Amino acid sequence: MASFIILMGVSGSGKTVVGKALAPRINAEFIDGDNLHSQRNVDKMAAGIPLTDADRLDWLQLIAKVGREHVAHGATCIIACSALKKSYRDLLRTDNTSICFVYLKGSFDLIHERIVKRSHQYMPSSLLKSQFETLEEPQADEQDVITVSIDQGIPEIVEEIAKADLIS
């Protein structure tokens, strides 16, 4: 059973909404990974500039550390983190044996429709294309990942995740 859950996917896939709904269901703390970005990263994204791997490194290391700390204290945590590349997920796995990923998967059109309707502090809809270009969807060798379609309501998504073998 995983004590450290990463809700992953491109911006607008519902990581925060799903995380807030899932946390009380499985008695976990929800942490929005967006709140762990450095001010430099926030400023860059707000200006419409995609982050590089180097930009993301400290952020991913911090997320991994927060997850390890929760597990060490016997707590379950859910962190919303795009984790777009396999190398990012591998970094998050380092020294985190109680980790699993939930890939919130949706089409560009569906997510774009959602993202233009919302207000986000620094993630303009113009960056969605670069997120899809960066995305390396989890493959079969990543056995600690479950994929959940976001082409359904939040209650159905939460139910599907709560019943998954990796976190139950």
Image (cartoon, rainbow, N blue to C red):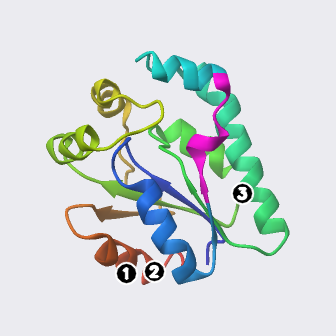
In the image, is 20 to the left or to the right of 150?
A: right
Q: Which residue range is magenta in the image?
A: 31-39
Measured Cα–Cα span from mark 3 to mark 1: 23 Å
Q: Which residue is mark 3?
A: 67
Quarter of the image where one finds residue 115: top left
Few, some or many C-alpha atoms within 10 Å of disc 3 (few <14, some 14-19, many ≥20)? many
Question: Which amino acid, by three-letter code, is at mark 3?
Answer: Gly
Which residue is nearer to you in this view: 151 or 168? 151
Amino acid type, mark 2:
Ala
Name the amino acid, label 1.
Glu
Can residue 168 be spotted in the picture?
no
Quarter of the picture holding the N terminus: bottom right
Question: Disc 1 designates what residue?
Answer: 159
Quick one: SS at disc 2? helix
Residue 48, above or below 99? above
Q: In percent of the image, x 21 and y 68: which residue is there? A: 152
The residue located at (37%, 81%) in the rendering is 159
Crowd around label 2: few <14 · some 14–19 · many ≥20 (10 Å):
some
